Image (spheres, coloured by chain):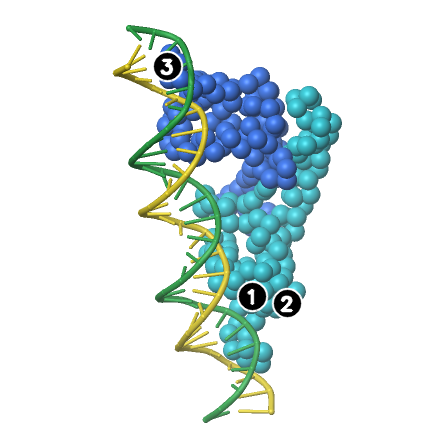
Chain colours: A blue, B cyan, C green, D yellow
Amino acid sequence: MRDLFSKGAFRVNGSLWIEGDGTRFFGPGPVELLLLIEETGSINQAAKKMGMSYKKAWEIVSRLNEIVGSPMVITATGGEKGGGSTISEEARQLIEYYQSLRERFRKFMEQESQKLQ
Amino acid sequence: MRDLFSKGAFRVNGSLWIEGDGTRFFGPGPVELLLLIEETGSINQAAKKMGMSYKKAWEIVSRLNEIVGSPMVITATGGEKGGGSTISEEARQLIEYYQSLRERFRKFMEQESQKLQ
DNA sequence: TTCCGTTATATCTTAGAGGGAATAACGATT
DNA sequence: AATCGTTATTCCCTCTAAGATATAACGGAA
């Protein structure tokens, strides 16, 4: 191994996600989308900031709500500013958990990378 | 968190790979393919066993050889049985390393899953 | 020389993911 | 009532990854 990786040309990487109903539904993408929805108060604006179509963003949100069972994103149509969206307390908890998980994963990867030196 | 996952409906999963030239090139798929090439002595038969087209298998092998620099798969055309392929010692080393890495990753995931109980 | 199964490669087709545009519904404010 | 920006939903277009297909080259064995 050491002879293979000694040049430092290779590195270990990976990704983590949460599954429900046997399929992946929560990872870096949805996390970023939820945070941007919280920040902007709008699925539409969040999608724009991610360079993603509204349709795609809505599909993610819909899927998220469906799989979790309780609404991750609370939407409102009409009204003062035409409507808007916020994220639920459960969504915040899920984000926080995922981020801490990811941090532990990052450290795991770091340890593994050091084994390649 | 505990209240979200207490039903046991969700689980954490992930994947690991090795990058070279900034792009992912080695993961579960290539590992299985290499092992089957070693077992069958043929890219063609290995691909069939994986339910994968020969083209796709050959692209993986080609990419593998290209990025690593030295040949992971040694091929021969013509001859007694029409040709065939074997894997190099470096390939065996890379497989072994990836599998040990994956085992450590599995334990990491196991620990994480226990945190959800 | 002919046969065989493989590697090597190009080309055509197909399935799925995603973007874009269009439209309706909504409800507070004016 | 009219306006506004958003959510919600549909339809069509495009791009890409992948499969399927076809063909050449190869070289030992018969």
The circle on residue A21 is none
Is circle 2 on the same chain as circle 1? yes
Residue D5 lies left or right of residue A86; in this view the side is left
Q: Position of residue A3 (x, y in %)?
A: 57, 50
Identity of the amino acid at label 2?
Thr
Q: Which residue is mark 2?
A: B40
Q: Which residue is mark 3?
A: A81
What residue do we see at 40% from left, 31% from top?
A54
Q: Secondary structure at mark 1?
A: helix
Residue D20 lies left or right of residue B11; in this view the side is left
Q: Is residue A62 visible?
A: yes
Image: A9 above or below D6: below
Q: Secondary structure at mark 2?
A: helix
Q: Position of residue D19 (x, y in %)?
A: 50, 60
Image: D15 above or below A49: below
Quadrant for residue B2, please give it: top right
Q: Is residue A103 visible?
A: no
Question: What's the distance in space between the residues labelled 2 and 1, CA to CA?
Answer: 8 Å
Is circle 3 on the same chain as circle 2? no
Chain to which the residue tagged by mark 1 belongs: B
Identity of the amino acid at label 3?
Lys
The circle on residue B43 is 1
Q: Secondary structure at mark 3?
A: loop
What residue do we see at 61% from left, 27% from top?
A69
Image: B35 above or below A45: below
Considering depth in this image, is B117 or A5 the residue closer to the camera? B117
Question: What's the distance in space between the residues labelled 3 and 1, CA to CA?
Answer: 61 Å
